[in-house]
Image (cartoon, rainbow, N blue to C red):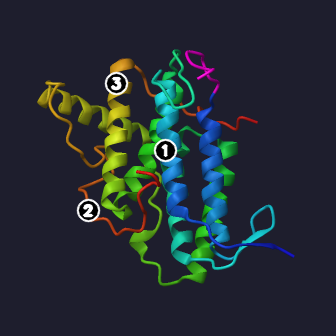
Amino acid sequence: MAQMQSELHVGQLVADAINAFLSAAALHLGMGSQEGETREGNATEAWLAIMGASALVSELSPHMAEPMRLYFGKALDEVLQAFAARYPDEVVPLPGLLSDPA
Amino acid sequence: MSQANQSLPFSVSELTLTILEGFLTAASMHMGEASPEGVRLEKPEPMQAWLALKSAGALLDQLAPIMNADLRVPLHARLTYLFETFEAKVPQTASENRTPPVSSLHGVVEEAWKEMQVSAQLDPAPSRAPVPQAPSLPGTGLPQRGSGLLFPPRGR
């Protein structure tokens, strides 16, 4: 018999996912995080994380409460600007970049 | 801070796939199906399923062009199956709420860079006080009044 779960908030899942993408981008841009800090940036990984965050923010911002929309919009802009400042000549990654890590 | 100043191995691809899997599982659970672990929701909510499908669709739409086919095809197939299941269960879903067609990632990136360059030319002074703005990426469109479906992250 299946185990029952009382609730599952997709809104919180979305917020956590965007935050995770933004944190990953910041980490791969060499910016600090709460857990630690990396000095070695990775443009491709940062770019992929920014694309993930922007996809969710772009698609879901019309359905977000205003404080959340403003917060994520500002955070995404900051990460994008940091990317442009750190990797001004970076090219778009090629198809096949995203593959099964397993 | 024991790991400060160290390079942390962190795969965004793995993060992306985990998040996609989470959205697809959440969608199926909010349509009354059990999770892979055999967990069911006591009160499935169609709106939550729609939100999860829309989120998965947004990620796939954006990232499918750079996915390997062996990854992209099963994910698309699963999303399509869930979406058709959703429409069958909730037939009054408006067509404008459906996931968008796959767009060109290349065009999205080019537009983003153009916008960033124009912004930099229009506002070269970095010391100006920051003003909260809506996302400037293409596809966002003009900011609309929020429906309140999503809520602010906890603790903010």
Span colored in magenta: B1-9
Cα distance, mark 1 to mark 3?
Answer: 20 Å
- Residue B144 badge: 2
Q: Is residue B60 left or right of residue A64?
A: right
Q: Secondary structure at mark 3?
A: helix
Image vertical order of residue B14 relative to residue A87, above or below: below
Q: Residue at x 45, y 24 (%)?
A: A31
Q: Quadrant of the N terminus of chain A?
A: bottom right
Residue at (53% x, 48% y) in the render? A17
Q: Point out which mark residue A19 bears.
A: 1
Residue denoted by label 3: A84
- Which image quarter is the C terminus of chain A in? top right
Q: Nearer the viewer, mark 1 or mark 3?
A: 1
Amino acid bearing label 1: Asn
> Mark 1 Cα within 10 Å, few/some/many (few <14, many 20+)?
some
What x and y, as percent, mark residue B59?
Answer: 52, 50
Q: Select label 1 or label 2 by which is in front.
A: 1
Q: x and y percent of residue B66 in the render?
A: 55, 38
- Between the residue at mark 1 and the residue at mark 2, the CA separation in whole angstroms equals 22 Å
Q: Which chain is mark 2 on?
A: B
Q: Is residue A85 left or right of residue A11?
A: left
Residue B68 covered by magenta stretch:
no
Looking at the picture, tell me which residue is in the foreground, B65 or B6. Answer: B6
Residue A79 is situated, as x and y percent measured from the top left of the image, at: 38, 33
The amino acid at mark 2 is Gln
Residue type beneath disc 3: Ala
Chain for numbered disc 3: A
Tell me, yes or no, whether dots 1 and 2 are on the same chain: no
